[in-house]
Amino acid sequence: MNTSVWSDKPWLDRHFHDVEQTSITKPDEFEISTKDYAHLSSIDDNSLDRIQGSMFGLAIGDALGAHVEFRPRSFLVASPVTDLIGGGTWGLQPGQ
């Protein structure tokens, strides 16, 4: 019995080792197959653009903000982030 509310999104369903669904697959045992993700042909262009934009924004924001991580707001006001700079809490290289 599949009681998933995500019937149109099978990649979000629970995965089991057996037909009786008594043993759920743990993250370290999970193997990804083509049935586990949405095919790009099923995603409209607007949604795909938004997904890609959010991923790029996440990566760029993470790299830009690495050197000011855990700094107080007053530091950011006095030294606004304008470029990829190394250093910071973790001693990272620019863009790392």
Image (cartoon, rainbow, N blue to C red):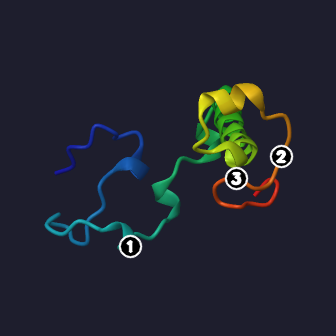
Q: Residue at x 82, y 55 (%)?
A: 94
Q: Residue at x 34, y 41 (%)?
A: 7
What residue is disc 3 on? 88
Q: Earlier in the sequence, mark 1 or mark 2?
A: 1
Q: Disc 3 marks which amino acid?
A: Gly
Q: Are marks 1 and 3 in contact (CB under 8 Å)?
A: no
Query: Label 1's element?
Result: helix
Image quarter for residue 74? top right
Q: Would residue 13 appear left or right of 88 to someone viewing this image?
A: left
* Image location (x, y in percent) of residue 12: 38, 48
- Residue closer to the observer: 74 or 67: 74
Mark number, residue 83:
none
The percent coordinates of residue 4 (x first, y second) are 26, 43
Q: Front-most of 45 and 85?
A: 85
Helix, strand or loop under label 2:
loop
Q: Which mark is residue 28?
A: 1
Image depth: mark 1 or mark 3 in front: 3
